[in-house]
Amino acid sequence: MKSNIIFLALLAFAVPYAAQAADGKALFAKNCAACHQAKGQGIAGAFPALAGSAFVQGAPDEVSAVLLKGRGGMPDFSSAMNDEEIAAVLSFVRSSWGNKADGIEEAQVAALRATLQVPKFAGGRMSNKH
């Protein structure tokens, strides 16, 4: 009986944790919408539109590199999001607002991070260990 109670207690904590896959829409709202706007339309002359963007729908490594290293006035998000989160937000953007590109996998982002020699995300602390 005691082992059943312990099992149920562990299960109660494990199921919500396992179900917490990165939510690309929520990550976009938190990290991107202020500049690129809630519907991806951007702000002319300041922040490019993501909706209908050929670049966003193009090569996965190119769009992933922007989040990992930044570009122009856009900061990098390598220390703010892990590979799963970057993949989730990019997958959301690539399939929203009329965009029809395939999603991006966490493994693709991780491989690109290593290739670009961007330090690994370590829960808010950066690490150069690959």
Image (spheres, rainbow, N blue to C red):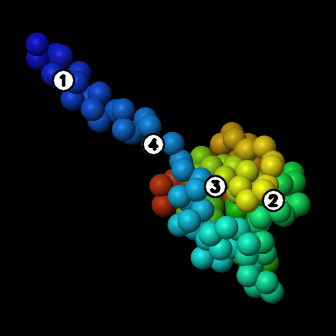
Q: Nearer the viewer, mark 1 or mark 3?
A: 3
- Report how far apart the C-alphas of labels 2 and 1 lie in the structure: 47 Å
Q: Which residue is mark 1?
A: 6
Q: Nearer the viewer, residue 23 or 65?
A: 23
- Residue flagged by tag 1: what amino acid is it? Ile
The reply to whether residue 111 is visible in this rendering is no
Q: Is residue 88 above or below residue 12?
A: below
The amino acid at mark 3 is Val
Give how far across and how far down residue 99 sits, in percent: 79, 55
Vertical position of residue 34 compared to residue 23: above or below: below
Dot 4 and dot 2 residues touching (CB under 8 Å): no
Q: Which mark is residue 89?
A: 3
Whole-angstrom CA distance, mark 4 to mark 2, is 26 Å
Rendered view: 85 above or below 15? below
Residue denoted by label 2? 56
Spot occupied by residue 56 in the image (x, y as percentages of width and height) = 81, 59
Q: Marks 1 and 3, Cα distance to the nearest angstrom?
A: 36 Å
Circle 1: element type: helix
